[in-house]
Every structure is written in structure tokens, then in C-alpha cells.
Image (tube, rainbow, N blue to C red):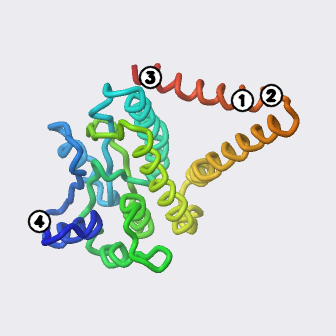
Amino acid sequence: LLPSNVGKRKAQIAAIRRSFGDLVLNVDSDTEIAPDVVSKLVCKMQDPAVGAAMGQLTASNRNDSWLTRLIDMEYWLACNEERAAQTRFGAVMCCCGPCAMYRRSALMLLLDQYETQFFRGKPSDFGEDRHLTILMLKAGFRTEYVPDAIAATVVPDRLLPYLRQQLRWARSTYRDTLLGLHLLPGLDRYLTLDVLGQNLGPLLLAISSIAALAQLALTDSVPWWTGLTIVAMTMIRCSVAALRAG
């Protein structure tokens, strides 16, 4: 317990510096972990080349609203498609904060860099999980995803808080992707493709949507192909997740 609320990063650093075990488990305050999470993450961390490992995230309040059900599906996609594919090629690009285990010896090497990160001239107060993962990869460690280490976390049940959360995560994604670009040549080529897709995909979707609205406004013609393509891509991806996740 610190004298005042100084943010997640400072609290993490204080706890890590007072720790003494070989491994450090980070669990967010709104998250409950399954009884076997620690043992399953520890099994993965027995390989000294692994610097960090994350578990699978689910929405503990999944049944609260249509939004929480969609977020639960989004988490399933992020874990069991994106992170699962990344770990197949040796580098999860973001070990999510609700449930992530780190090698303490590696953390101690990286803490000064982690603590002194600045963004636009001010100490950074967002994107802790992604930045710490990038630092692990930069130090030469592997990062892994463990699908059967289940953690249930509370997700936003209203649209405005959800959009604020997504904006904060997007800022972190773009900022730390730029910081980690020099790592990509040393990683599997799939990860370069994946990172480009993550960063360019939302921008291309936004441009397509704006162009479709402009076509509708300026020519009075309905942009059927744009709309159908976006809907088809969304339905295919979500259907795969819905069928595989039940």
C-alpha cells in the first residue's frame, strides 16, 4: 500500500522492488483468477528463455448486456486467435495486465526503462502492459500465451466507458508499435504481417467508411459493395469465434 494513488505503473514498480520470488504475477484489481492459473503459468515459465506469459481473459460480467457479450467475444478472438498465433511464432506482442506472469530477474533489468518512459514530454500513464512486453522482447526474452490459465475480468457495460478504454488502448498500440518496429526483423515474418494488420486494418476500415459516407452524400448512390464487404468480413470473423467458443 502506497501513501497515495500514484497510478498502476508506480504501484507495480514498488511491488516488484519489494518482491523476492523468482516469478512475479500481475493481476488487476477487478480480475479473478482460476485456482490453477499460477501452476499453469509457472509450467510455461520453467523455460529460462520465456520472460513473460499471459493467461486467457474472459468477461466476468458477460451476461450483463449485449455490449459485455460482444466484449467477451472480442476477448476470445484476441486471446485464441491473435495471441495464440503470436505465441506459435515466439512473441506475444502484449501480455495483458489482468493476468500476466513475469520473470523477476528480467523485470529488475528493465525497471529503470519502464519507470522513466515519457510520452509527449510527460511521464507515461497508459499502456503499461504493452510497453513492458516490448521491453521483454527487446531484452531477448520470449513471451507466451497459456490458453488454459483462465482469468475473468470486469469489462465496461456502457458504450462511453468502453470507447474511452478503446481509445486509451489504441494510443498504446500505435505508440509502442513504433517503439518496437526495430524488433520485427529479428522475429518471425508472420509477426511483421500481424503487426501491420493490427495497425493498418482499423485505419483502412475508417477510410473506407468515410469514403462510403462521402459517396452517399455527394452522389446519392448507396455504397453497397463497401457496406457488404465490411458486413461480410465482420460476420465471418465473429461466426468463427462464436462457433469455436460456443
> Left of 161 or right of it: where is 148?
left
**Element assignment for label 4:** loop
- Residue on which disc 2 sits: 222
Which image quarter is the C terminus in? top left
Labelled pair 4, 2 in contact (Cβ < 8 Å): no
Q: To which residue does mark 3 refer?
A: 244
In this rendering, the answer to whether 235 lies above or below 104 is above
Where is residue 103 drawn, in percent x and y? 26, 62
Residue assigned mark 4 = 1
> Which residue is pictured at 44% across the width and 63% down the height?
134
Disc 2 is placed on an element classified as: loop
113 or 146: nearer the viewer: 113
N-terminal label among 3 and 1? 1
Q: CA distance from mark 3 to mark 4?
A: 42 Å
What element does badge 1 sit on? Answer: helix
Q: Earlier in the sequence, mark 3 or mark 2?
A: 2
